[in-house]
Image (cartoon, rainbow, N blue to C red):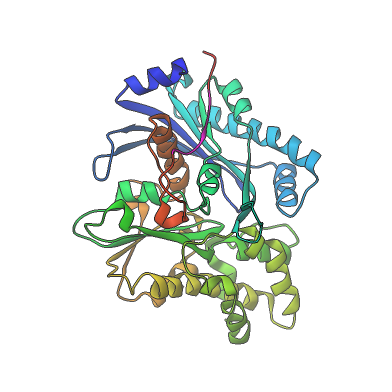
């Protein structure tokens, strides 16, 4: 048993940093929090500070290239390079909040996903399916002097699961209650939901990736502006364009949207290749109209997914939104139109900053792993059972 783990388990309150770079690959989101208690309704999360460290342009370009099939040597180097960025992000977060790094008990690093291939059944005696997150934890532990939990998704996939989504376990701890049926919706590069029926147990929770979040619109804006802009700030392009119904119908026919949960997706389905193809094949349509249509597609696909896969199971009283997509008023309005009887709010109202929700989630997941508590959700991922997630990299202090 590692000495640092023994010390960790003797404490009742833990200071943990959570790190993640999402499928948008625009930078590293970090949050530091004090966590105490355990179980639904008893977990206490005090957010001390949050910070986003944008990737330098050359690293973001390398990440996107690796996601689209980079060479193995380049990916190997990128693994260590991203570890350096995650390390610096952690140190910048703590410095900006005047928090001594020596007071941090643990870092939970999701890393940067460059490939996520859900399980397939055509591999003979071998299970196919894999996932790869970069950001070498040894670099993070060495630079910060803090123990690291990383590589969260692989154990779930080894147990037959999708390896995603993983945040639903944290959604259950933070948002589930006996009086209200809720959905926690995170709109990052990909959109994912967690349905929390009122009074439900952990195994009653339904969670999955609905499909695209900001990914398609981000790629289209980047392509349209020749790299000058990375996303549709405040939904301004979408607001100035008109929806093309033929293109919208084409996008809504994507087979992933009809696939039954459990399911997960990523750049392989809705990445740059898909976005540019939709953009170029429809070059007779005004660029702003294409952006408006892609924004509508994202919002409508989220709403339709909820109506198709969640509402037949039970009621939905509230929708709690987090992630960068919550800042796009046009996207949010499409979701509201699809779900007119549902109260729509943001995670800030529940003490969870909407941009830091996923980094905080991996702080919680890291703590659960260090305490040897399973934190996947088999009903969401399809794994054969509960599993303790992540690999432990000790510090040397």
Total tally of numbered discs in the picture: 0
Is 337 left or right of 25, judged from the image as shown? Answer: left
Instruction: Left or right? Give the position of 160 relative to 12.
Output: right
Q: Is residue 266 above or below residue 93?
A: below
- Indicate the position of residue 284 as horizontal and vertical percent values: 74, 83
- Pick the residue in front: 148 or 225: 148
Image: 287 above or below 129: below
Magenta-drawn segment: 388-393
Camera-side residue of 153 and 301? 153
Q: Seen in the image, is 318 located left or right of residue 244?
A: left
Given the current orientation, which residue lies at the most extreme bottom position? 246
Most extreme residue toward the top is 397
Q: Percent x, y for residue 242?
A: 58, 81
* Residue 21 seen from this side: yes
Residue 322 in view of the camera: no
The residue positioned 24% from the left and 40% from the top of the image is: 42
Give residue 241's quadrant in the image: bottom right
Locate the N terminus and report the quarter of the image it occupies: top left
């Amino acid at each position: 048993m590692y000495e640092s783990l023994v010390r960790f388990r003797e404490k009742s309150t833990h200071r943990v940093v959570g790190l993640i770079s999402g499928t948008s690959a625009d930078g590293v989101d970090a949050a530091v929090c004090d966590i105490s208690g355990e179980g639904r309704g008893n977990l206490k999360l005090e957010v001390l500070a949050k910070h986003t460290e944008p990737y330098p342009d050359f690293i973001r370009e390398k990440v996107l290239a690796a996601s689209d099939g980079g060479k193995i040597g380049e990916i190997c180097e990128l693994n260590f390079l991203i570890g350096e960025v995650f390390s610096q992000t952690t140190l910048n977060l703590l410095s900006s909040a005047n928090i001594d790094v020596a007071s941090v008990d643990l870092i939970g690093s999701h890393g940067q996903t460059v490939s996520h291939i859900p399980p397939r059944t055509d591999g003979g005696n071998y299970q196919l399916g894999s996932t790869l997150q970069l950001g070498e934890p040894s670099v993070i532990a060495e630079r910060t002097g803090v123990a690291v939990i990383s590589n969260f998704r692989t154990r779930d996939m080894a147990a037959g699961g999708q390896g995603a989504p993983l945040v639903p376990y944290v959604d259950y701890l933070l948002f589930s209650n006996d009086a209200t049926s809720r959905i926690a919706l995170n709109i990052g590069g990909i959109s994912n939901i967690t349905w929390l029926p009122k009074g439900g147990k952990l195994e009653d929770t339904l969670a999955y990736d609905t499909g695209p979040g900001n990914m398609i619109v981000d790629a289209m804006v980047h392509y349209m502006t020749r790299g000058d802009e990375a996303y549709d700030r405040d939904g301004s392009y979408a607001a100035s364009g008109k929806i093309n119904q033929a293109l919208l119908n084409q996008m809504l026919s994507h087979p992933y949207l009809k696939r039954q949960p459990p399911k997960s997706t990523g750049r392989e389905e809705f990445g740059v290749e898909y976005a540019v193809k939709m953009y170029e094949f429809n070059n007779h349509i005004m660029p702003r109209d294409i952006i408006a249509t892609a924004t509508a597609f994202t919002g409508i696909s989220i709403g339709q997914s909820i109506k198709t896969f969640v509402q037949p199971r039970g009621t939905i009283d509230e929708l709690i939104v987090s992630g960068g997509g919550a800042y796009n008023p046009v996207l949010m309005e499409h979701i509201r139109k699809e779900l007119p009887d549902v109260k729509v709010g943001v995670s800030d109202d529940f003490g969870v900053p909407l941009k830091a929700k996923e980094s905080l989630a991996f702080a919680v997941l890291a703590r659960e792993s260090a305490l040897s508590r399973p934190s996947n959700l088999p009903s969401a991922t399809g794994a054969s059972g509960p599993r303790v997630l992540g690999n432990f990299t000790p510090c040397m202090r």
